[in-house]
Amino acid sequence: MSFDPASLVFSQPESATDIRASTVLPAHRENVEFRTEDGKLLVGELALPESGEISATLITLHPLPTHGGFMDSHVYRKASYRLPALAGVAVLRFNTRGTHSPRGTSQGQFDEGIGERYDVEAAVRFAVERGLPNRWLVGWSFGTELALMYGAVEPVASQVEGAVLLSPPLHRATDVHLKEWAASGKPLTVLVPEHDDYLQPAEAAERFSLVPQARVLGIDGAKHLWVGEKYAARVLDEIVDDVTEAGAGPHGLPRQWTGPVATA
């Protein structure tokens, strides 16, 4: 049985609530499906602000599904829980081909980042067709490979503003893809954990020097999976700073919420 976001139960606390890992803030959430050019039906969730204009749209690309990555990987889950309410940001999460989560299983099989090109294109096409504005790719680990390989070429390039990369391993993505990003001129922000298992800040700065417009930011103390509220919150602050005009504010996004909340 697929998880239904409408099953979340919201209550009104008497005082402000500290925002923790399982805190869910109000949003309009719906289960979505879209089909790829090669016929695979992908499942996901779209979280929209309850009211007001959408400041930006995140199209999230999750970590490696053969190592536990899926649309519910914790940074993306927290983005969908918080950003519609805190920053007016729409968050599209989905399972790439063959990936399973409580939402369901997308059709197809893991294809080492090759067939996943159609998944990226389908997600962006869905966002365009829904009229979601200011679209950005956000890739994490394996998802950064997809963003780098397919985000700066058509049909995706003309439909997104840029990308934010979390923990890029640069295994599948090559210098050819980095040069395509350079040629596109599109913004690229690269968040690199100090203690990453695959690519650490100094090497990342060297590799991404091929992209003059890339901003490479080393995050002290962080690891590849961004475990810990401190690091997840920092990632969300950096994303909002990059993709919205207002940004996260001088002290980052609020760490407390006054209003209805649910617990996941």
Image (spheres, helix red, strand yellow):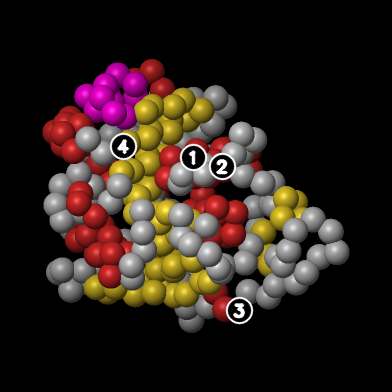
How crowded pointer 4 is (Cα within 10 Å; few <14, some 14-19, many 20+) is rated as some
- Please provide the residue range marked out in magenta: 204-214
The residue that label 2 is drawn on is 248
User: Is the residue under label 1 in contact with that under label 4 (CB below 8 Å)?
Assistant: no
Q: Is residue 172 visible in this depiction of the protein?
A: no
Residue furthest toward the right?
14
Between 172 and 175, the residue placed more toward the observer is 175
Q: Which mark is residue 241?
A: 1
The Cα atoms of the two marked residues, 1 and 3, are separated by: 31 Å
Instruction: Determine whether, in the image, residue 41 is placed left or right of residue 84.
Output: left
The residue that label 3 is drawn on is 7
Q: Which mark is residue 187?
A: 4
Which quadrant of the view contains residue 149?
top left
Q: Amino acid at mark 1?
A: Asp
Quadrant placement of the C terminus: bottom right
- x and y percent of residue 207 in the render? 27, 23
